[in-house]
Amino acid sequence: MFIFPQPTAYSTSMKLNILLLLICIGLLFLPFLLIKDKHEAKPAPKLELDFEIECPILIEVKGELEKIPLETYVLGVVAAEMPISFHEEALKAQSIAARTYVLRETNYGEKAISKTVQKQVYVSKEDRRKKWGASFDEYEDKLQRIVASTEGEIIVYKDQLITAMFFSTSNGQTESAESYSGNAIPYLVSVPSQSEELFSPNVKKQFEFTNKEWANAFGLKWSESMAKTFQVTKTDSNRIKSIQMIGKTWSGREVRALLGLPSTDFTVSFQRDKVVVETVGYGHGVGMSQYGAEVLAHDSVRAHDILLHYYKGTEIKIFSTCLKSPTNAKNSN
């Protein structure tokens, strides 16, 4: 039988020393273990905030050297498209319409946009300084404040960005998209837009053409039959849908372009040696009338309600810069 050796005083002391050494080592590393546990117990940081900061929308404007931050672009459009003297609520409405238009047109900054009247006119800060001269600081501060007050606001129809068309001056009634292009759009229907003559210098205009100038505009040779066969058809908003002359037909939009008219609401008077054309309004007539917005603003109508008047059945929402989706937005009202 194997007999275990009995512990001696020396071996017991060694064991105690080793135990004390292990305890000391454990106490030495305990703070590090606690720090690690403390860090691991923290909740994960909210990446959404960092992500929002890191993904601004930049707009590529044809003719500009660098891409432009969205809100800077909106300011440049409002400065170009609407008189700075306009009521603040009208300028706010223009800001929201301009932002909505560019986001849809560029797919949230993925495509370039031109700075022409066919899209949206844009003026840079340098151009604004030249345009406003000594009043630059005052006007720039005013517009920055107005645009900032609408930051992120967009117009949606069934949670989709709308085509926020706008124009200068109405003839008393806006044009529907269906009458303008043949394509019905539920939020671009004809609505009243009256009393704009109180503010707009472009409500009524008169143009005169010699008989030869009139004929040349249509690629024809003048003849008395032009006056005798002239007929028009109109849209529901009293604009010219088409004209007929010597067996040929032109749309109102074509006539406007051929003659350089400000509007498709026009009347034609054939006189002895000339043709007189009188127009009402300025622009294509679809969507928001800018001078109509000014009229409503002076009647104490707020920007959101101005937009809801011109774009029927829509909502004003705030979109997420990074999600790029109004479906996740909150109502701004």
Image: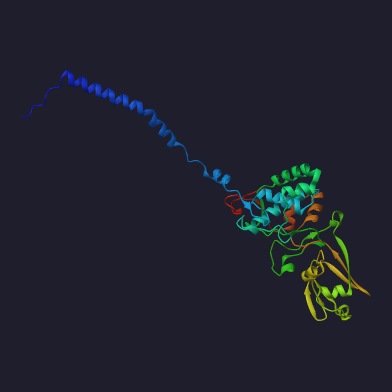
Q: Residue at x 80, y 55 (%)?
A: 291
Q: Residue at x 71, y 47 (%)?
A: 147
At which x and y percent is residue 129? 76, 46
At which x and y percent is residue 156? 65, 56
Q: Is residue 277 left or right of residue 327?
A: right
Image quarter (top left, top right, bottom left or bottom right) of the N terminus: top left
At which x and y percent is residue 331? 65, 49
Q: Is residue 75 visible?
A: yes
Q: Nearer the viewer, residue 207 or 149?
A: 207
Q: Nearer the viewer, residue 20 or 234?
A: 20
- The residue sitting at the top extreme is 9
Q: Is residue 297 above or below residue 213?
A: above
Q: Residue at x 89, y 74 (%)?
A: 211
At which x and y percent is residue 200? 84, 56
Q: Is residue 235 visible?
A: no
- The residue sitting at the right extreme is 272
Quadrant of the image occupied by residue 314:
bottom right
Q: Is residue 270 left or right of residue 323?
A: right
Quadrant of the image occupied by residue 271:
bottom right
- The residue sitting at the left extreme is 1
Q: Is residue 253 above or below residue 164?
A: below
Q: Residue at x 78, y 42 (%)?
A: 138
Q: Nearer the viewer, residue 265 or 41?
A: 265
How many circles with numbers are drawn on the protein? 0
Colouring style: rainbow
